[in-house]
Image (cartoon, helix red, strand yellow):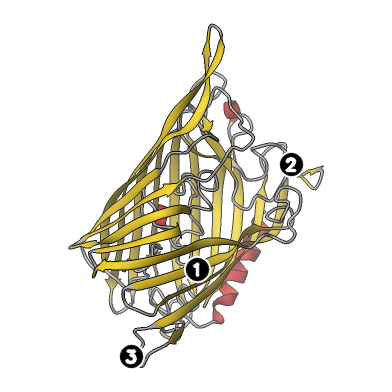
Amino acid sequence: MKKLLLYVAAGLVLCCAGRGASAQGSTEYGAGIKIPVNEDGSKYIRFITWHQVWVRYNEHNSGTIRNGEPVDNTLDFGLRRSRFLTYSQISPRFLVLLHFGINNQNAVSGGVNPTLDGKKPQIFIHDAWTEYKVFDKALSIGAGLHYWNGISRSTNASTLNFMAIDAPIFNWATIDAADQFARMLGVYAKGKLGKLDYRMAVNDPFLTNTAQAIGPAANYNPQNNNKVYQGYFNWQFLEQESNLLPFMVGTYLGSKRVFNIGAGFLHNKDGMWREQNTINGFIVEKENINLFGVDAFLDLPLNTETNTALTAYGVYYNYDFGRDNVRNIGIMNPAQGGGALRGNAFPTIGTGDILYGQAGYLLPKDLITEKARLQPYAAYSYGSLDGVQNSRGEKVPVKVLDLGANLFLEGHHSKLTLNYRNRPDFTNPDNLKYRPEITLQAMIYL
C-alpha cells in the first residue's frame, strides 16, 4: 500500500507541466462557452460541462463481496460526476436553467441496474427551473426542479469548486430519499437585503420507501403528502457573493475576500414513520423531519505578491429524522455485496448531531511551475447519531478524516486532487476498525 501511495503521489507531481491560474476560474477560460444574443452581451445563453474521474484504492469493510467473491481491497475506476448545464437570460428579469447528467458509475454500480452492474447509467435531470426577478437584487421568485436548499452553505454546494475532494454527503440530508439527488419540485424565493443573502423554498417531497419498510427505528413515511419548508440565511461581512445561481463556491483561491456566517433549516411534517409497541401489538407512529444547521465560511488572500490564500469552513448540524434513524452510505461504492455496510459505506446521515470542518492553504505561486498552484487541505467530521450504538447500547461516534491536496492547472477548470481518507468500518461497533481509502481525481470543466 505504501508503494501505491508513492506511485500516485509521483503521478500527481509529474502532471504539473500543465498551465494554471491563480483565480477561482481562469483568465484563459474567460466567460466560458457563452453565446451573446445582443450587442452588449446582456442577453446570452451559457453552457457548462464537466467530468470528475476517480482512480481509487479502497480497503473494504469486513464481509464485502464484489462480483460474487469476498474481497479485502480493490483498485477501481469510476465517473463520480458527468454533467451538462445550460442557462440563459434573454431578459434581465427572466432566467431559465437546465442541468442533467450522471453520477457514481463504476464497473459494478451506477447503471440501469444500480446494484447489479455498472452499464448504461441513466442520464437524468438534476435541475430545471424558471425564475422571475421581482425587485432587482432584493427578490427573485422561481419554480421547478431546483437546488435552492435550506440547512447550510454546503447543502447548496457547487460540485465545480470543492476544496476537499468531495462533499461529506450528510450536508445533503435527504439525498435521493425525499428528494431527487438533493433537488425538489417546488417554488423558491431568493435575494439580498443589504449584506443578508437569503433563500427559501416550499416543495413537494418525492415518494420514497415504496416497499413501506417499517420497524422500531424511524424510516421515511411512504404516505407523506406534506410540504417541505426550508431556508438558508447568511450574513456576508466582506465581499458579496453572487446568487444568480444557487451553487455556492467551496474555495475562491484568494480571488475574493469572503467571510460569512449562516443558519438554515428544513421541516417536513410527518416525514417519517416507525413502529410503536403497545399491549395489543404495534401501531404506526409518525414523526416530523426537523433539520438545522449553523456555519461559517472564510476565504482570504494572505499575500498579494505570492498569491497565498486561506480557506476555512465549519458547520454544526442538528438532525431529527425520528427515533434512531440512520442511513449508511458509501460514495460510488466499489462493491455490491455484503449488506448495508459493504465496500466503503458507513453511518452517514441520521438523527443526532454532526460537526464538520475543513481548512486549506493555497501555497505560493511559482512553487511548482510558473502557473500551477498547489493547495493542501484537511477535513474532519464527528457524528453523534442516536442509532449508532454498540452491544451495550452506548453511542459510538462516527469520525472521518480526509487529508489531501489540489493541483490547479487552470484554476478549478482543470485540476487534480489526491485524497487520503481514514474511514470507520462499523461491521462490528464493539470493535471498530478504520480503513484507508486513497483517491486520485482528474477534473475538467468548460
Query: Considering only order in the chain, which callout, 2 or 3, is on the residue closer to the N terminus?
Result: 3
Amino acid type indicated by mark 2 = Gly
The residue singled out by tag 2 in the image is 337
Above or below for 93 versus 76: below
The residue singled out by tag 3 in the image is 40
Observer-side mark, 3 or 2, equals 3
Above or below for 121 versus 231: below
Tags 1 and 2 touching, CB below 8 Å: no
Secondary structure state at the residue bearing disc 2: loop
* Residue 217 in the figure: left or right of residue 139: right
* Residue 361 in the figure: left or right of residue 60: left
Query: Considering only order in the chain, which callout, 3 or 1, is on the residue closer to the N terminus?
Result: 3
Q: Residue furthest bottom?
A: 39
* Residue 350 visible to an observer of this rendering: yes
Residue 180 on image: x %, y %: 53, 52
The residue singled out by tag 1 in the image is 98
Observer-side mark, 1 or 2, equals 1
* Residue 241 visible to an observer of this rendering: no
Residue 219 on image: x %, y %: 53, 32
Counting labels gives: 3
Q: Residue furthest right?
A: 68
Distance (Cα) linking label 3 and label 2: 57 Å
Residue at horizontal 61 percent and vertical 38 percent from the top:
210
Mark 3 crowd level (few <14, some 14–19, many ≥20, 10 Å Cα) = few
* Residue 441 in the figure: left or right of residue 262: right
Secondary structure state at the residue bearing disc 1: strand
**Along the line of sight, the residue nearer the viewer: 220 or 395:** 220
Amino acid type indicated by mark 1 = Leu
Amino acid type indicated by mark 3 = Asp
